[in-house]
Amino acid sequence: MAPARTIPPFPSDVVPAHLYEVDFELLCQGNVTEAQKVFDAARGYGFFYLRNHDVDSDFMFELASQVFQMPLEEKMKYDVGTTGKYFGYKRSGSQYVDSKGTPDQSEFYNVSKDDVLRTDPNAEPLQHPEPVNQRRKELEDFMRAGHKVITVVLRVLGEKLGLDAETLPALHRIDRTGGDQARVTFAPPMMDQKAIALGEHTDFGSVTVLFNELGGLQVLNPQSKEWKYVKPEPGCAVINLGDAVVKLANGQLYSGVHRVVPPPGEQAKYPRHSCVYFARPNGHVVLKPLIDGADEDEKPMTADEWIAHRVMLRNTANYKGPESLAASRGTEHTKSNRESVL
């Protein structure tokens, strides 16, 4: 294992977002206070910290370093392209960050849960660079631990919404195909504090499990509309909700708007990596409300269709003008989201 790098602390004069901190061990035990924190967070920022979990992310930062140090020519062998494909390498500049079509400054490498776990034994295995192939067992452990987290979170949310505790987990089975993935990311040192590494967005899926070493992630306060840094807390994962679970909950939850900008203070001088587990509903699941109320989608998409729709429309190659950004948006601007949550 490579030694941990030394990075400057998060600046003490930067006031971060105030997020709930949830104890996963207590949450698994049915602690009422911790469950209420999850629900309050799901209707506030859409983000919270999670402590005492079982997700080992250390190797993912090593994997990120190995993958993104490869020559561009090598990484491009695994390029995701422009048609909605989502697994493989996303180069810097292939997405836009604003209505002007400004290119992003982030690289991703996405690894399919179905490919690693062989959910469909008849599917053709995906090709990966050697650093990813060498970490398949660790990636499997990371995915299974991440999925355990999202299952518990979905049970809590379902019960709070008046659903059976297993209703939402049943739509997110780890042994069924879908868009779940692990991701490592890279953004270069960025001293221009007005720069944007990754534009404002909501996540496509249901629950995201995120790990950061440096600042740079910002969340939009849904009331004040101010951007606030999310301070990395040792031992904590950052959990946030995505569009799919908001659609299933008929807008009763909030998919937090977030972006990535230069880390604050001296941290901006360092390359920034993050690692993520994204959980989505199984691919065939139709994203229609499970709770009574007005359905704003005349023709709801399946989870797989929703992912492809969001990915393709945010691609720089498909940018046509300011209307492209509007078309690419998720649930953060829907009528039900604004009225019922905010």
Image (cartoon, helix red, strand yellow):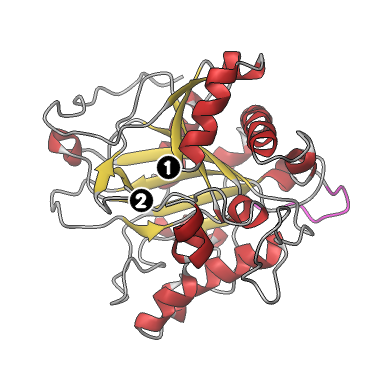
Q: Residue shown at 24%/34% (left/top)? A: 16
Q: Is residue 138 above or below residue 125?
A: above
Residues at marks 2 and 1 touching, judged by CB atoms closer than 8 Å? yes
Indicate the position of residue 255 as horizontal and vertical percent values: 49, 51
Indicate the position of residue 225 as horizontal and vertical percent values: 28, 54
Q: Residue 280 versus residue 75: which sits nearer the camera?
A: 280
131 left or right of 232 in image: right
Q: What's drawn in magenta, residue-wise?
A: 120-127
Which disc is residue 227 wearing?
Answer: none
- The amino acid marked with disc number 1 is Gly
Q: Secondary structure at mark 2?
A: loop
Say which residue label 2 marks. Answer: 222
Residue 53 visible somewhere in the drawing: no
Q: Is residue 141 above or below residue 177?
A: above
Say which residue label 1 marks. Answer: 44
Q: Residue shown at 19%/35% (left/top)? A: 267
